[in-house]
């Protein structure tokens, strides 16, 4: 089995999935901090990403994390004003970040539309790429720091981050961060990591819960290619983990992939 071969963990329902994913992420962060002194995680928005953060906030085990030695990044962001409640970062702060002792300098939000670049989403994306490059070490790939875990929600159309099927962004092979215009999901203007940047992470975890995700999960795991199913092009260097509930997994042939260890 290669690192790109997905491992599946299927939970009874979305609540249990969020709790189990939270426990798994806390353990992974603690292990990374023990091994290297710090940890680096890329957050995702959406209902499953936010449910995961809320589950961490509610977990007594969250105190095992040295929050001051955690770097947080985002896989994508809605290009709207900084305080807009639709921003992934605003939602993440409400669910978890404002309640733990993070180092503000290590929380790397993507630029907002009322930032120094104004409405120039390409300039804002380039600014985030520069921030990633400054954090990257000499051995890191593509000028991107070696994320310990990169979280991605899977959309009903198989999109991940703000990379949509057949959209120009999913074809990008040189840039690490792009401005997205004309996204099929509102708001139409966004910032996103690219698939090459996503694939620099040690581990990529894809989250999907609910029957509305079942078709997307089955399609992405059937190998159609990243242009048709961007989620199929999201994988980590050492591990690719799909965290699902039963509803989202119901259309996957049971023999398709072996389950991951718990």
Image: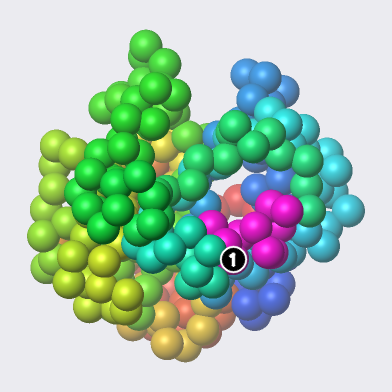
100, above or below 15, in the image = above
Any magenta on residue 165?
no
User: Could you tell whether 2 is left or right of 74 in the image?
Assistant: left
**From this viewpoint, which residue is outermost toward the top?**
138
The magenta span reads: 89-98
Nearest the eye: 98 or 112:
112
Which residue bears the numbered disc 1? 91
| Residue lying furthest right | 60
Q: Using residue 88 as the reference point, say whether residue 225 is left or right of it.
A: left
Quarter residue 216 falls in: bottom left
* Rendered image quadrant of residue 212: bottom left
The residue at 69%/28% (across/down) is 69
Residue 129, image x, y percentages: 31, 36
Work out whether residue 66 or residue 260 is closer to the camera in this orientation and state it: 66
* Left or right: 69 in relation to 169: right
Q: Nearer the viewer, residue 90 or 241?
A: 90
């Amino acid at each position: 089995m290669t690192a790109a071969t997905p491992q599946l963990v299927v939970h009874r329902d979305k609540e249990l999935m969020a709790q189990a994913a939270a426990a798994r992420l806390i353990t992974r962060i603690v292990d990374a901090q023990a091994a290297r002194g710090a940890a680096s995680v890329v957050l995702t928005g959406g209902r499953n990403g936010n449910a995961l953060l809320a589950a961490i906030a509610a977990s007594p085990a969250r105190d095992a994390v040295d929050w001051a030695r955690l770097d947080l990044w985002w896989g994508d962001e809605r290009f709207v004003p900084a305080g807009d409640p639709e921003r992934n970062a605003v939602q993440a702060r409400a669910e978890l970040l404002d309640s733990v002792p993070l180092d503000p300098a290590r929380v790397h939000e993507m630029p907002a539309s009322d930032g120094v670049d104004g409405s120039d989403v390409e300039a804002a994306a380039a600014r985030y790429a520069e921030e990633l490059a400054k954090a990257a070490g000499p051995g890191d790939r593509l000028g991107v720091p070696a994320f310990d875990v990169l979280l991605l929600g899977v959309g009903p159309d198989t999109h991940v981050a703000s990379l949509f099927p057949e959209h120009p962004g999913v074809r990008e092979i040189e840039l690490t961060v792009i401005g997205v215009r004309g996204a099929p999901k509102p708001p139409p203007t966004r910032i996103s990591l690219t698939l090459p940047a996503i694939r620099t992470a040690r581990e990529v975890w894809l989250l999907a819960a609910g029957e509305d995700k079942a078709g997307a999960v089955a399609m992405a795991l059937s190998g159609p290619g990243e242009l048709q199913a961007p989620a199929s092009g999201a994988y980590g260097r050492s591990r690719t983990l799909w965290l699902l509930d039963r509803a989202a997994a119901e259309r996957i042939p049971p023999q398709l992939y072996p389950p991951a260890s718990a």
